[in-house]
Image (cartoon, helix red, strand yellow):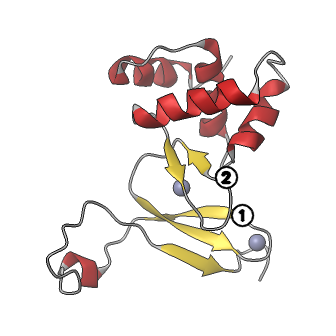
Amino acid sequence: MSSYRPEIVAAFRERKVRCTPQRYVILDYLKRSPKHPTAEEIYKAINRNDPRASLATVYKSLHAMALAGLIREVTVDGAAVRFESHMDKHHHFVCERCGRVEDIDWFEVPALENRNRLGHRKLREYEVLMRGLCSNCN
Ligand SMILES: [Zn+2]
Ligand SMILES: [Zn+2]
């Protein structure tokens, strides 16, 4: 049984989202998986335990959970949308050799904090997308 169970059940309750067995399995998988999987990777992983899931229902579950703020989409340009359950602010580092997407602890970007460069635009949020070679590849 998952050690994340109380946390997962509480998250669904708090966000007032129905915790279906499939949504539970998806969130459990995202909490265990350190990378940022695509919908297809999630589908393949959970299908090992629940062969009834279809890719379409996995997409629907992911969409509903992202809307409710249980998970979020990570867009790394040019590639399929990825998902994560890490909801605290953080930046991303993409390895150009192996494609791994890593979390980088949050730090403010001073130019954005000071808003000098934004003019009259209203900033809601931002994150830095870094590219390079991960520690395994360099
Ligand atoms: Zn790498
Ligand atoms: Zn992340």
Residue at 49% across / 30% down in the picture?
Answer: 65
Q: Quadrant of residue 79?
A: bottom right
Kind of residue indicated by mark 2: Lys
User: Considering only order in the chain, which callout, 2 or 1, is on the residue closer to the N terminus?
Assistant: 2
Against 44, is 37 above or below? Answer: below
Residue 138 picture location, percent across and down: 77, 83
Q: Disc 1, disc 2: CB below 8 Å?
A: yes
Q: Position of residue 77 (x, y in %)?
A: 60, 67
Left or right: 113 in relation to 135 = left
Position in image of residue 134 (x %, y %): 70, 74
| Tag 2 secondary structure | loop
The answer to whether the beta carbon of the residue marked 1 is less than 8 Å from any atom of ligand 1 is yes
Position of residue 28 relative to residue 123, above or below, is: above
Residue 1 in percent (x, y) is at 69, 16
Neighbour tally class for label 2: few under 14, some 14-19, many 20 plus, Cα within 10 Å: some
Amino acid identity at mark 1: Arg
Report helix, strand or loop for mark 1. loop
Left or right of 59 in this view: 107: left
Give the residue displayed 79% in from the left and 18% down from the top: 50
Q: Nearer the viewer, residue 117 or 71?
A: 117
Name the residue at 58% across, 27% down.
Answer: 61
Q: Which residue is mark 2?
A: 35
Q: CA distance from mark 1 to mark 2?
A: 7 Å
